[in-house]
Image (cartoon, helix red, strand yellow):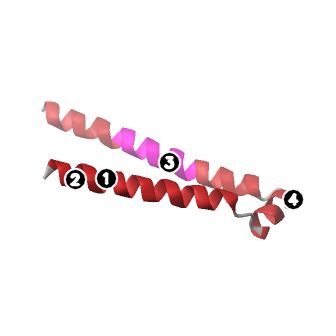
Amino acid sequence: MKNLFSRSTLLVLLLTLSAVSFGQNASSSMDNVMRSNGQIYVVIAVMLTILIGLLLYLVRLDKKISKMEKR
């Protein structure tokens, strides 16, 4: 069972890495337009805001769960 799990995990990892490497070579006209207009920074700012919000939510949730476990 453990061997099957490790093989399937390795397969998914390798497939993901190959998909990422193919994605690196493609040049999209959309990213060039967004870079030239400066809109790429807006996209990055929104993504960072969402990720930071998720991180803060998880930290807060972890603290609450730890507090409840201590009781």
In the image as oriented, which residue stretches furthest toward the right? 36
Q: CA distance from mark 1 to mark 3?
A: 29 Å
Quick one: SS at disc 1?
helix
Q: Which mark is residue 53?
A: 3
Q: CA distance from mark 4 to mark 2?
A: 45 Å
Q: CA distance from mark 4 to mark 3?
A: 28 Å
Mark 2, residue position: 5
Tag 1: amino acid: Thr
Magenta stretch mostly in which secondary structure? helix
Q: Which mark is residue 36?
A: 4
Q: CA distance from mark 2 to mark 1?
A: 6 Å
**Residue 52 within the magenta-colored segment of the rendering:** yes
Tag 3: amino acid: Gly
Report the magenta residues as a range.
49-60
Q: CA distance from mark 3 to mark 2?
A: 33 Å
Label 3 Cα crowd, 10 Å radius (few <14 / some 14-19 / many 20+)? few
Mark 1, residue position: 9
Mark in front: 4 vs 3: 4
Quick one: SS at disc 3?
helix
Tag 2: amino acid: Phe
Q: Earlier in the sequence, mark 4 or mark 3?
A: 4
Camera-nearest residue between 40 and 10? 10
Tag 4: amino acid: Ser
Label 2 Cα crowd, 10 Å radius (few <14 / some 14-19 / many 20+)? few
Instruction: Answer left or right for 49 relative to 64.
Output: right
